[in-house]
Image (cartoon, rainbow, N blue to C red):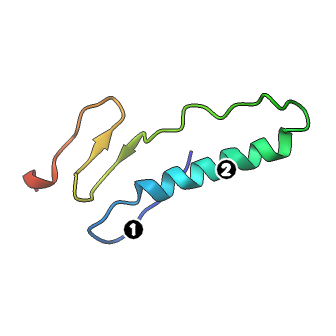
Amino acid sequence: MSTASILGPTGVEMEALTAAAVAALTVYDMTKALDKSIEIQDLYLLSKTGGKSGDFERNGKRRRSAESN
């Protein structure tokens, strides 16, 4: 799991997802000698707050939109 935050009008979900992907690739790199068929799976955004598109939770329900602020 990765967390990112910023003070500003934009979200940082791409940065958080990139950090999680890099962490998974690091684990893969350290363990590939044990098994070359290791897979990285289930990399997705769990939730976010703020930004132009508003808040988001993985269950598919938006808590609030940017327009309702």
Q: Residue at x 8, y 51 (%)?
A: 68
> Which residue in the protein does label 2 denote?
23
Q: Is residue 30 above or below residue 40?
A: below
Judging depth in this view, the residue of 39 and 59 nearest the camera is 39
Q: Is residue 9 left or right of residue 34?
A: left
The residue under label 1 is which amino acid type? Ile
The residue under label 2 is which amino acid type? Ala
Q: Which residue is outermost to the bottom?
A: 8
Q: Residue at x 78, y 28 (%)?
A: 37
Q: Is residue 62 visible?
A: yes
Of mark 1 and mark 2, the one earlier in the sequence is 1
The answer to the question of whether label 1 and label 2 lie on touching residues, with beta carbons closer than 8 A, is: no
Q: Is residue 38 left or right of residue 46?
A: right
Q: Quadrant of the N terminus?
A: top right
Q: CA distance from mark 1 to mark 2?
A: 20 Å
Q: Is residue 27 left or right of residue 22?
A: right
Q: Residue at x 58, y 55 (%)?
A: 19
Q: How far from the left and from the top, in percent, is residue 16?
A: 50, 54
> Which residue in the protein does label 1 denote?
6
Q: Residue at x 30, y 65 (%)?
A: 10
Crowding at mark 2 (Cα within 10 Å: few <14, some 14-19, many 20+): some
Q: Is residue 35 above or below residue 21?
A: above
Q: Is residue 3 visible?
A: no
Where, by quadrant of the figure, is residue 63 drawn?
top left
Where, by quadrant of the figure, is residue 57 drawn?
top left
Tell me the SS state at disc 1: loop
Label 1 vs label 2, nearer the camera: 2
For the image shown, how many numbered marks are present on the structure?
2
Q: Quadrant of the C terminus?
A: bottom left
Q: Which residue is outermost to the front?
A: 36
Judging depth in this view, the residue of 38 and 59 nearest the camera is 38
Q: How far from the left and from the top, in percent, is residue 2?
A: 55, 50
